[in-house]
Amino acid sequence: MDFGSVPSEKQDDSNQLRPGDTVELFVLDNDEFSGRYLVRTDGSIILRRVGRVMVGNLSPKAAEGAVKRALDAGQLTDARVILEKGVGLPKPGTSGDISVVRVFVSGKVSRPGPYELTPVGGRPPTVYQAVLQAGDCIRFAQKSKVHVLRKSADGRYSKIPADLAAIESGETEDVILLNGDTVVVPEKTIGFGS
């Protein structure tokens, strides 16, 4: 069976992995690789000591095979892998869960606006997940200057840096969002002299 092939449109693709989905990975021979991973905009997950593994548009079973091959190629011998689709992000306006986190995404994204995000594995949604839910960054977005505006109990706002470029490359941790946060994706400023 070819795990890298994309199913035809006539097949049920409701279970295919998409950017913004999460997967739970269990590597029975080595817990170091087990954990919850976010499917990135390019359809990949990033495994420690392995790098990018493409899982986008694959069923969880096919993605399981892709992860096994990646682990077998450099880290383990005949890895035993279980991969399950985790809790995805809901469409805006659906809240089926009492622990929904309501945020607003503004600036240079495809669909700015309010979003209701479901915590994943007990962990609140992150900036990266919110930006994906809003359709990802658009042209001229300054990913390194993304920030979160958070209102404190005394009514003041704090600005929390969330360098999306560094988050995407795995150089820094994603910023966890709280109810009422606003994610701001600013426009690049282009200087023409002084």
Image (spheres, rainbow, N blue to C red):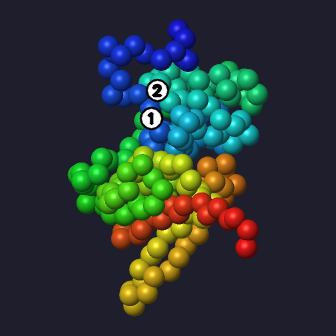
53 and 136: which is toward the camera: 136
Element type where label 2 sits in the image: loop
Q: CA distance from mark 2 to mark 1?
A: 6 Å
Q: Quadrant of residue 40?
A: top right
Instruction: Confirm whether residue 30 shows in the render.
Output: no
Mark 2 Cα within 10 Å, few/some/many (few <14, many 20+)? many
User: Residue 131 placed where, x, y %?
Assistant: 46, 53
Q: Quadrant of residue 114?
A: bottom left
> In screen coordinates, is 62 left or right of 151?
right
Up the image or down, 33 lies above or below 182; here it is above
The residue labelled by disc 1 is: 18
User: Residue 117 placed where, x, y %?
Assistant: 35, 55
Amino acid tagged 1: Arg
The residue labelled by disc 2 is: 57
> In screen coordinates, is 53 left or right of 147?
right
79 and 3: which is toward the camera: 3
- The reply to whether callout 2 and callout 1 are in contact (CB within 8 Å) is yes
The C terminus, quarter of image: bottom right
Instruction: Confirm whether residue 53 shows in the render.
Output: yes
User: Residue 33 placed where, x, y %?
Assistant: 64, 40
Up the image or down, 126 lies above or below 62; here it is below
Identity of the residue drawn at 59% across and 24% down: 66
Mark 2 or mark 1: name the one nearer the start of the chain.
1
Identity of the residue drawn at 66% across and 51% down: 170
Element type where label 1 sits in the image: loop
Identity of the residue drawn at 54% across and 61% down: 187
